[in-house]
Amino acid sequence: MNIVIISPNQNAYPETFIQAHKNRLAGTIHYLFGGDVPNKSDYTHQNIVSGSYFNKLGFKLRYRLFNSGLSKPQYALKMYLKKYNIQCVIAEYGTTGTQIYPVSEQLNTPLIVHFHGYDASVHDVLENNRDDYRKMFAAAKFIIGVSQVMINKLKDLGADERKLVYNTYGPDDSFFKIKRNFTDKPVFFGVGRFVDKKAPYYTLIAFSKVVQRFPKAKLVMGGTGPLLETTMNLSRYLSIENKVVFPGVLTPEGVKKHMSKATAFVQHSITARNGDMEGTPVGILEASAAGLPVISTFHAGIPDVIIHEKTGLLCDEHDYAQMAENMLWVLEHPEQATAMGETGRKNIKENFSMEKHIGKLNELIEKAVHG
C-alpha cells in the first residue's frame, strides 16, 4: 500500500512519534514535509514540483487550466498523490489536515488526521481554524487523539464520535530493556522542551525544597527551548545551581543513559495561558517503560498512562509544594518507589507499547482504504 505522511517539519527533535510512523508503518511510505502544505519528499528527495524549468512551466500551465480551486502548493500535492498512486494520507497535526483535506476530497483519497497537542488546545489555533476543522472533520475517515481529554475536546469542536480514535503514543522497545544502576546519590531526571506547558520552573522550585532534606540530591533537566535561560537563572537565584545539570538536547541514547541512573522522572506539565496543552508526553511514557516512578501532574494524557500512587505520583497543576512532597516520598521509601517503577514498566508494556500504537494505526489505514 502506498501511504503519504505529511508533517510541517522534517526532523524536529521532540517529534519522535512522527519518526516512528515514518519508519514503522506497513506499506511504502512517502514522507512529505516543509509546511502545512508540503513542498519536499524524502521518497523522491526532490521538491514536490520538480526543479527543472520545463516542468515548472508545465506545472504553471496545468495549474491555470485544472487547479479546481486549489492553491498552487495544494495542486502540486494533488499531482504528486496521483503520480505515485497514493492510497491513504496521514496528516500529522490538525492544522496540517485543514490544508490537505481539499486535495484528498478531490482525489477521493482517504485522509486520517492525527492531532498531537497544541493543535487541539491553543486558543488562537482553535479560533482561527474553527470552520476549517469542521470541514476537515467531515472529510476525514478517522481523527486520532492521544489523550482522553483531547478526544473530548475534538468532540466539542464538532468531530463525529464515530470517527474519533484514542491512540496514544508508545515508547521505543529499547526503553523496556533499561537496567537501572542506583547510586548513593539520588537523581531526578526530566527531559523535554523548556516551554510554558512544561513549566520547568515549577520542577526547579519543587527540587529546591527537596535538597533542604536531601542535600546530596541532583536534578538533571535535558532539552532546550525559550525558557531554558530563565530556568538556569532561577537555579542560581535559589542557590542550587551546583545541584542542577542542564545537558541540552539529548539523543535517544543519552536519554536512556540518564534514565538508567535516575531515581525518578519529573515533569510539571500545566495548561499554558494561551491554552497550550500536552497530548501525552513521550518522555513520560519512556520513563515509565524504563521502570522509573513518574512524578508529574494531573494534566492532559498523563493520568491516562500514569496510575496515581501505583506507577507514579501526580499533583494538581501549579502545586509545586505537593510535587516536592512526592519527590521526597520517593527518596524516603526507596523500595516502594522501585516497585512503583516496575509496576509502571509492566503497565506501559501491556497497554501502551509502540507495537500497540503502530498496530492500531495500521488497522485504521486498512479500514480507511478497504472499509
Image (cartoon, rainbow, N blue to C red):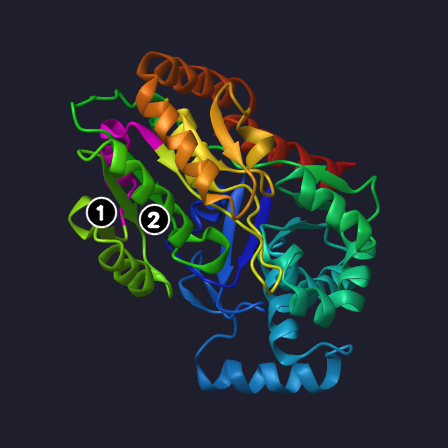
Q: Taking 40 as reference, is 344 above or below it? A: above
Q: CA distance from mark 2 to mark 1?
A: 9 Å
In front of the other: 54 or 13? 13
Where is the C terminus found, in terms of image quarters?
Answer: top right
- In this view, which residue lies farthest toward the front? 212
| Residue type, mark 2 in image | Leu
Q: Characterize the local packing of mark 2: few (<14), some (14-19) or many (20 or more) Cα atoms within 10 angstroms.
A: many
Magenta stretch: give its range.
Answer: 250-264
Residue 162 in view here: yes
For label 2, the residue is: 204
In front of the other: 235 or 149? 235
Image marks 2 and 1: residues in contact by CB distance under 8 Å: yes
Where is the N terminus found, in terms of image quarters?
Answer: top right
Tell me which residue sits at (55%, 24%) in the image.
307
Label 1 residue SS: strand
Tell me which residue sits at (61%, 67%) in the image.
77
Label 2 residue SS: helix
For label 1, the residue is: 244
| Residue type, mark 1 in image | Val
x then y, percent, for residue 80 = 59, 64
Does the stretch in magenta take in 183?
no
Q: Taking 343 as reference, is 257 above or below it? A: below
* Quadrant of the rendered image containing residue 208: top left
Judged by its main secondary structure, the magenta piece is: helix
First-in-chain label (2 vs 1):
2
